[in-house]
Each structure stands twice: as structure tokens, then as C-alpha cells.
Amino acid sequence: MRFIYRCLAIITVLLALPYTARAEQTHLKVLMLPFDMHGKEDISSVRKAVMELLASELHKRGVEITGIPALKELMLREGVKKFDDASAFRIAALAPSDYAVSGSVTRIGRNTNVDFRILDIADKGVAAFYFKSAESDAELMQRLKEAVPSMQEKMSAGLRARPSVKSGIIDGIMITGNRRVDTAAIMKKLASK
């Protein structure tokens, strides 16, 4: 009989391993704010390409991009044209996010610069800064693409470092295998925090 219980316990543990491994993975939610533009000529196409590249590369790595409806609402209804850190935190309240990416695209002469930062929504602070510069748009996009793994790792590490929030209700406790103490006596000693 003990052998059967041990086998059942081992099978239960082995079946639960894939689920616990998936539970430990961090599921990032990132809010992409519109980047500012600075330059003599119109560089909106570069800005759009930069933002799309960052969003698509993060999405390929399993990051969920959030807040697009909230951004549209702020831009159309309230006429917000410039997004700062306060805007990021306000939008994150509407569309729950772990992090926000905010930055700017600047063209000076032949060089195009992209500087952006990752804002930690929970800590209300800056998690990381990035700066990429290149003379050609193709080279700039390649440098940005190379920065994405580092971005994702910094966000994942920050999310893993946060204390986990456990929610739920325990609807039953079953005491088994105890021969010395009565089940009712054990139940009286149980307490929750």
C-alpha cells in the first residue's frame, strides 16, 4: 500500500513540474509611448519605424504590448501630444503594465540618434537608459534590434526581483497520514497569516 502511495506522489510531482516551471516564467506587459521627434526635417517615418521595431522585437520575445487603446484615447479625446513619465503612469493605471518605454528620435546632420528609457511602473522610476546612434537608418535599426534582448532581460530581472503577490482563497484542508494526533486537534492549531 505504501508503494502505491509513493508511486502516486512521484507521479503527481512529475506531472506538476511543467506547470511550476511555467509559473516561474515572467510575463511582461510593456507600454510603448510615442517617441518625441527633434530635427529640421520631418522624421516621423523614422520614429514610426523605431517604435514598430522595438514593439515587434519585444513581442517576438514574448512581451505583451499594452495600452494602445488608452494612448489613442488620450491623443484623440484629450489632445495629448507629448508623453512624459507622468503620462506613462496614468496610462498604466488604465492598461495595467509592468514597464513603459519612452524616448525620442533626433536627427542632427547625417546622424540619427535614438535615446529611450524603460520606466518601472511599480517603482515609479527609471529601470534603464539606452542610446543608439547611426548615420544610416538600416544601421540604426540593426543597433536597436541588438538592444532588445538586453531590454527584455532587464525588465524580466526586475519583475523576478519583485515580491510575488499571492491571491486566492483556500477552500479546504485535508489532513492525511497522521496516526498520532487526532485530525480535529491539528485543525484547531492551523492559522493563516
Image: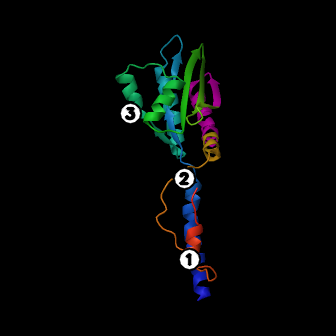
Q: Position of residue 149 (x, y in %)?
A: 62, 41
Q: Residues within 10 Å of mark 3 (few under 14, many from 20)?
A: few
Q: Chief secondary structure of the magenta span? A: helix
For badge 2, the amino acid type reads Lys
Mark 2, secondary structure of its residue:
loop
Q: Which residue is the site of mark 2?
A: 166
Give the mark nearest the N terminus, 2 or 3: 3
Does 50 sit above or below residue 40? below
Q: CA distance from mark 2 to mark 1?
A: 27 Å
Q: CA distance from mark 1 to mark 3?
A: 54 Å
CB-based contact (under 8 Å), mark 2 and mark 3: no
Q: Which residue is the site of mark 3?
A: 69
Residue 175 in sight: no
The residue shown at (39%, 23%) is 75
Question: Magenta stretch: residue 8 in it?
Answer: no
Give the label, 2 or 3, closer to the camera: 2
Give the mark nearest the N terminus, 1 or 3: 3
Q: Residues within 10 Å of mark 1 (few under 14, many from 20)?
A: some
Q: Which residue is the site of mark 1?
A: 183
Give the label, 2 or 1, closer to the camera: 1
Q: Position of residue 78 (x, y in %)?
A: 37, 21
Q: Quadrant of residue 80?
A: top left
Give the mark nearest the N terminus, 2 or 1: 2
Q: Position of residue 191 (x, y in %)?
A: 58, 62
Q: CA distance from mark 2 to mark 3?
A: 29 Å
Name of the residue lying farthest toward the left? 77
Q: Position of residue 114 (x, y in %)?
A: 59, 24
Name of the residue lying farthest toward the top? 40
Mark 1, secondary structure of its residue:
helix
Residue 80 in sight: yes
Q: Give the extent of the magenta segment.
A: 128-153
